[in-house]
Image: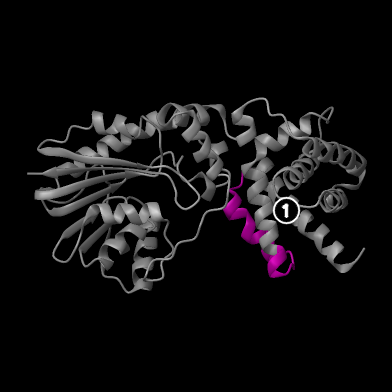
Amino acid sequence: MTSRDLAGVAVRRTALDALVRIDEGGAYANLVLDPVLSGSGLEDRDRRFVTELVYGTTRMRRACDHLVERHRRGGVTPRVGAALRLGAYQLAFAGVAPHAAVSATVSAAPKAARGLVNAVLRRIAEDVDAGIRWPDPATELSYPDWIVDALGRRLGPEVAAEALAAMNRPATTHVRHDGYVQDLASQAVVEAVEAGPGHRVLDCCAAPGGKATGLAAAGADVVAADLSPGRAGLVAANAEGLGQRVAVVVADATASPYRDAAFDRVLVDAPCSGLGVLRRRPDARWRIDAAAPARLAGLQVRILEDAARLVAPGGMLVYSVCTLTEEENAGVVGAARLDGLALQDEATHVPDADRDGMYVARWTRS
């Protein structure tokens, strides 16, 4: 083998280490990668390739398993299963040359199973070359059925399929004028608050602080709150790093410790199921359960109802969630009792090549 061939095997072996920890140990992909890569000895470009392989294989797990199970008989160990899934991802989705994908993955697999891995991956390569016939959209797009169904009901099947496909591709990086990396959909939420100099603004669920610092950059006097001391610390660190003045507090958004009518603008960027940002969290689609949207909607309503009393006359309440389920969008708007507030508008940002999915609703107090 040449030095690049050996590096290719090392890349696949490192990716397998991470995949086994994710699949067997339940580790989060973003948390497991750093320690795995730090001990790998790989060059920077190879580390980036490991990240792509781990995130992509995790994201496309259902589709990869379908390709593997067409040709595999019987059970396998977790590491062999991960090797088969990793090879399928390279062949079907990553654009890796078939000979390189098969050869390097086989060499990285456990020695006793290399014959099996070689045979299955060669058959998958033939399937890909002939054109894959998928049994259903959820398998092809590699999502749980309930997510495909939920977004289909909310957006319509065609738009939902386009959104789900967009979230299978890497996120576009957007940098604000102050150097902070923030998606365009989140920047649109900041703009929707319409905060400026002289406005007193509360960000109820502020961590990690992107929207709070964006509001401060607009000249507003910002209070950023979060229930978790650790997450509140993230807000403080981000504000300090950007040179923004943000008052950071630890507070429960369902029972805020502020007097009534204390703020001109109140932003509720609520905890949600996150179905609009799944490309940023490759394993999230497999961790969220079908009952989560309804469960979280109850929390969102409680936060909104407490936030309503904090809005001063002439002020605005803004609700945003990075998800697109009916329960957490229109369902919350319809269920929340917001005395004295009138719904001004609502908007849905569908995930596409350039931005995440987001829902925003705004109320004003006369």
Q: Is residue 250 left or right of residue 364?
A: right
**Is residue 135 in view from this perspective?**
yes
The answer to which of 162 and 340 lies nearer the viewer is 162
The residue at the point 22 percent across, 32 percent down is: 336
Q: Are there few (<14), some (14-19), or many (20+) residues within 10 Å of tag 1?
A: many
**Is residue 206 in view from this perspective?**
no
The span shown in magenta is 26-46
Q: Is residue 288 magenta?
A: no
Q: Secondary structure at mark 1?
A: helix
The N terminus - image quarter? bottom right
Quadrant for residue 346, please give it: top left
Q: Is residue 332 left or right of residue 314?
A: right
Residue 44 screen position, x and y as percent: 68, 69
Eyeballing the image, is 78 above or below 40? above
The C terminus - image quarter? top left
Q: Is residue 44 magenta?
A: yes
Residue 334 screen position, x and y as percent: 24, 29
Residue 300 screen position, x and y as percent: 30, 37
Eyeballing the image, is 316 above or below 129? below
Q: Which residue is mark 1?
A: 15
Residue 209 screen position, x and y as percent: 35, 59
Quadrant for residue 242, please give it: bottom left
Most common secondary structure along the magenta stretch = helix
So how many labels did they put on this image? 1
Q: Is residue 336 left or right of residue 102?
A: left
Eyeballing the image, is 251 above or below 335? below
Tag 1: amino acid: Ala
